[in-house]
Amino acid sequence: MDTYHVVLYIHLFALFIGIGAASVLLACLLQLRRAQTLAEAGPWGMVAGKVSRLFPIAILGLFGSGAYMTSDIWTWSTRWIDVSIAGLVVIALQGPLVAERTAHKLKHALQENGPGPLGGHARRMTRHPGLWVAEFTNIGLVLGIVWNMTEKPGIWSSIAAVVGGYAVGMALALPFTRSQEAELAPSPEPAA
Ligand code: HEM
């Protein structure tokens, strides 16, 4: 056992925290999207808010442990590392600047809606691209970076992996931002 491999373990541990949190967040977004009433949406919004607090830990853990390994036996001009750092910066920015801001707007829309069936504005907010595009493109970027970390390709292949991951994430997100008119119709009052 050497320090390098202990740090590699920490690196993977941070990755699992991030992937775990992103999976729970995806479940919350899916449930928010299909919620018909405030009572159905509320708990998922709360879980989403709590689980999102894990992302800074995952990002700092990945960067800190990655920086140690880079300084130990790699160099800061290693192409697959530089491209992956750029990808991690995009992930770190999209979270607070796009997803969190949209989540605050969704929270306000739900509060304004009040108890009972969700109106058009609140339901449209659950389909906001700021939530879905940030979630799926961040997962796509992470999977592109995992490719770079395991394959250690040259500059162009490294860029292709993260840009490709982002593009696939975007393509997967778009259907979730669309809503059929029927889906947005107010739901009938539940029987007393
Ligand atoms: C989302 C961000 C990241 C993810 C998903 C990620 C993922 C991974 C994975 C899965 C490995 C294991 C590869 C293997 O053992 O074959 C790894 C190793 C490594 N990562 Fe990262 N990483 C990320 C960010 C970073 C950053 C920002 C740095 C540098 C500052 C970095 C530097 C390294 C280094 C040096 C290794 C060791 C490579 C080896 O010894 O084979 N990583 N990473």
Image: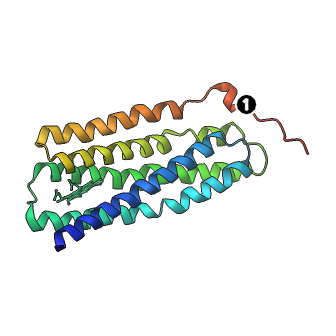
Q: Point out the image quarter for the N terminus.
A: bottom left
Quadrant in which residue 37 is drawn? top right
The CB of the residue at mark 1 lies under 8 Å from ligand 1: no
Is 5 located above or below residue 91 in the figure?
below
Residue 9, visible in the rendered structure: yes
Q: Decide which of 164, 105 is in the foreground and name it.
A: 164
**In screen coordinates, is 30 left or right of 166?**
right
Q: Which residue has dot 1 on it?
A: 185
- Picture coordinates of residue 83, whole percent (x, y): 19, 48
Q: Point out the image quarter for the C terminus.
A: top right
Is 74 located above or below residue 129 in the figure?
below
Q: Residue at x 26, y 63 (%)?
A: 63
Residue lying farthest top? 181
- Picture coordinates of residue 100, whole percent (x, y): 48, 54
Q: Decide which of 146, 116 is in the foreground and name it.
A: 146
| Ligand 1 lies in quarter | bottom left
Quadrant in which residue 31 is drawn? top right
Q: Residue at x 28, y 63 (%)?
A: 11
**In screen coordinates, is 53 left or right of 151?**
right
Count of numbered tags = 1
- Picture coordinates of residue 186, whole percent (x, y): 76, 34
Is 34 located above or below residue 9 in the figure?
above
Residue 101, visible in the rendered structure: no
Residue lying farthest right? 192
Residue at disc 1, secondary structure: loop
Q: Residue at x 23, y 64 (%)?
A: 8
- Mark 1 belongs to which amino acid? Ala
Q: Residue at x 49, y 39 (%)?
A: 129
